[in-house]
Image: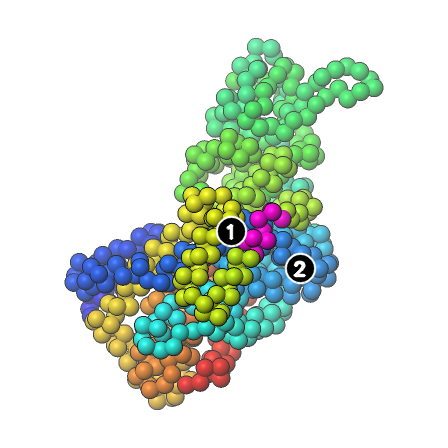
Amino acid sequence: MNITLTVLIVAAFFFMKGKVRSDLVAVCALLALALFGILTPAEALAGFSNSVVIMMIGLFVVGAGIFRTGLAKMISSKIIQAAGGNENKLFIAVMLVTASIGAFVSNTGTVAVMMPIIVSMAASANIDSRRYLMPLAFASSMGMFTLISTPPNLVINNALIEAGYGALSFFSFAPIGFIALSVGIVVLFFLSKMLVSKKDGSSSTKQKGKTLKELAEEYNLSHQSYKIEVKEGSSPLINKSLADLQIATLYGVSIIKIVRKVGNSRFTKNFTEEVAGPKSIIKKDDILYCQGEKENIELFTAENKLHIETTDKHFSDFQESGIAEIFVMPNSKLINRTISEIRFREEYNVNVLGIKRQKEYQMHDFTDTKLHSADALLIQGTWKDLANLDDRQDDLVLVGQPLKEAAKVTLDQKAPIAAAVMILMVIAMVFEIVPSVIAIMIAAVLMVITGCLRNVEEAYSSINWESVVLIGAMLPMATAFQNTGVDTLISGGLVDQLGDMGPYALLAGVYFCTSLLTMFLSNTATAVLFTPIALKAAIGMSVSPYPFLFAVAVAAGMCFASPFSTPPNALVMSAGRYSFMDYIKVGLPLQIIMGIVMIIALPLLFPF
C-alpha cells in the first residue's frame, strides 16, 4: 500500500509540474508498480487492450473524418451565421453549436474548427470575440450528451461493467448534458461580459475585430517596416531566390513584398508587386519591403550593397500582403521545434513575422525559439497560401484572416458519406446492434475505405497517441488500488468523515475532490484514479454507485478554473488574450455553481 501511494504521489507531482510528458509519467508509474510486484505483467498490460482505449482510438479516426470533409465546419458556420449580428443570439448559438458537435467528436477539434468562424462572425458584427472564445472552450466540455463525448464517460462505464453493474446507454448522459449546458449558458451569459467590459479603456462590449492595421500595431510592426532598394548591380542578392539566400535565418530580416519596375509609360502600370515567397527572385532596381530590427536591417543593407529608401515607417505599404495569426494546437507536431527547423517559408510558403506567448511578443531573434502549445504566430503570405493552412488543423488553427475568407466554408464531396457513417455508428450504439467498441471500429474503418480520410497513414496521424498511452497506462492503477487496498483506505476515509452526514455529503466530497484534482491533472487521469474510490465509497455506504460515478465523470470533464486543465481552455487563451486571472474570475464561479447544481441533480436522475 505504501509503495502504491508513493508511486501515485510521485506521478501526481510530475503531472502537476508539466515538465515531463504525461504519457511518459504514466508509463513510468506503470513500470514501477510492475517492478515492485504490485501488478503482474498481464495486469500491467491489460489497460492497452481495454475497450476504453480501443474506442478512443476509433473515435479519433471518426472525428478526423468529420473534420477533414468540412462537415463540422459547414454545420457550425451555417448555424452561427443564422444568429446574424445580434450579440446575445450569437452567444447562445456559439454555446449550443459547440456543445452539440462536442457531444460526438473531439472537443479540441471542435474548438479548432469553431475558433476562426467565431472570430470572423464577431468581427463582422462589430463585437469583441473575447466574450465568445472562453465560453466556446467551456461549452465543448459541457456537451456531455453521449457516452462518447469525453474519455471520463467511457472510464466510468467500463468500471460499472467490470463491477457487475448494468452498462450505460449511449444517451445516459443526455439529461446531465442538458442541465450542464443550461446552467452554463445562464451563468456565462453574465460572467462573460466581465471579459470585455471597459477593457483597455473601452466602455462598450462592442469592438471591432482585428484588422490588418490592428494586427500590425499589436505586434509593433509599424516600427519595424522598411523599404529597401536594390540599386547596386554588384549586390550579391541579384538573380538569387529567397530560398537560396536564407535572409531570415542569417539576418533576422523578413522580406514581405517585392515591387519591380517594368516600364516607363505614363499611361500603363509601371510596377508589378509580388508577395515574397521561397521562389521569389531578386532583380536590380527591385524595392524590397522588409520587417526587422533597425540593427539587423542596417547590417543586411551594408553587407549586400542595398539602399534604405526611407526610414519613414508606415505599414500602409504592406496592406496588400496577407497577414494572419495562427495558434499552435495542444497536440501539435510542431511543439518543441524551432521556426528554423519547421522551415515555414519552404513548407508553407509563408513568412513568420513574430511570436506571441501569452502577453509577451518576440519580434526578432526568434528563429531558434521552440514553439509551445497555444503560441500565436503572426504570419504573412498570399491569402491563398494562408487559406491552405486551414488543412493543418491538427497542428495549427488559423484566425485573423479577412472576414470573408474566415467565413468561407467548402463542403467536400465526401461530407455526406462522413455524416452517414457517423449516423450509422450512433444508431448501432443506441440500439445495441453490435457492441459499442465494434460499432466505433467499423465506423473508423469506413472513414478510410470511403475516402473521408485519404489513407491509413492519415488515420494513424489523426490519433492522439499521448492520450491513448496515458489512459492505457493509468487504467491498471485501479487494479493496483484494489490489490493493495488503497481504494478501501481512501474511500473508507471519505465515508468516515462524511458518511454520518448522509449520501449527499459524501457525493459532494467525491465531486469536489475530483474537481479540485482535475485543475492539476488531466481529466482522464483524474477519472481513472477516482472511479474505483467513488465505487468503493458507494458500496461501503450501501447506496447505488451510479450517482457517485457520474459525479466523477462530470467533475473530471468540466474544469473551468484553469487554462491548463483541458486542451480547449489552453487553445483559446492566446486567441482571446486571456490572463490566468480571467479563468479564475469567470471559470471558478462557474465550476462551483455547476458543482452545486450537479450534487442536487444527480441523485434525482440516478437515485441513491
Residue in the foreground of this view, choosing between 541 and 497: 541
Quadrant of the image containing the N terminus: bottom left
Question: Which region of the structure is painted magenta?
Answer: 411-419
Dot 1: element: helix
Is residue 417 highlighted in magenta? yes
Which residue is tagged 1? 65
Q: Please give the name of the residue rendered at 48% of the width and 70% of the height, measured from the top-left corner.
A: 431
Q: In the figure, 369 relative to 254: above or below?
A: below
Q: Quadrant of residue 534?
A: bottom left
Q: State the image coordinates of residue 42 (x, y, percent, origin top left).
A: 22, 61
Q: In the figure, 348 relative to 18: above or below?
A: above
Residue in the foreground of this view, choosing between 187 and 308: 187
Dot 2: element: helix
- Can you name the residue that lies furthest to the right here? 267
Callout 2 amino acid: Ile
Q: State the image coordinates of residue 223 (x, y, percent, origin top left).
A: 62, 35
| CA distance for labels 2 and 1 | 21 Å
Q: Is residue 32 left or right of residue 120?
A: left
Which residue is tagged 2? 79
